[in-house]
Amino acid sequence: MVSIIENKATIEGTIKAIHENAGPQGYSQVEVALQKSTDVEGYPNLAKADEGSVITINVRPEQLKEEGIEEGSTLCTTVRKVFGQQYYMS
């Protein structure tokens, strides 16, 4: 059994692709070239290990519009890592 560590990080990266309704039920997936991550006070930063690679962030469809998420733009947001290079946007 895999144990999950409660974690958060503020990340910055370039949006490479958006896949609507491709994630878990009720989520879209956004591929981001992760450039840097910073700590969120009180939580471990598990995103640090993925800097320089492409990560997948699960995002609610309404967040795509609210956050102005578009291919080619920069994304700066808080995320939590669940496994591998999979994340959820807070």
Image (cartoon, rainbow, N blue to C red):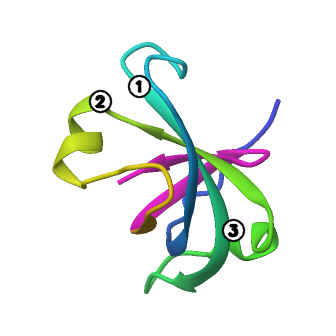
Please tell me whether mark 1 or mark 3 is closer to you in this view: 1
Name the image quarter holding residue 53: bottom right
Please tell me whether mark 3 sits on a helix, a strand or a loop: helix
Q: Position of residue 52 (x, y in %)?
A: 79, 72
Q: Position of residue 51 (x, y in %)?
A: 75, 74
Residue found at x 61% / y 75%: 44
The vertical placement of 52 against 26, above or below, is below
Kind of residue indicated by mark 3? Leu
> Considering only order in the chain, which callout, 3 or 2, is on the residue closer to the N terminus?
3
Provide the residue designation for mark 1. 27
**Residue range corresponding to the magenta coloring:** 77-90
Residue found at x 79% / y 37%: 2
> Considering only order in the chain, which callout, 3 or 1, is on the residue closer to the N terminus?
1
Q: Position of residue 55 (x, y in %)?
A: 69, 52
Q: Which mark is residue 46?
A: 3
Q: Position of residue 58 (x, y in %)?
A: 49, 37
> Which residue appears farthest toward the left when viewing the image?
66
Please tell me whether mark 2 or mark 3 is closer to you in this view: 2
The vertical placement of 31 against 13, above or below, is above
Provide the residue designation for mark 2. 61
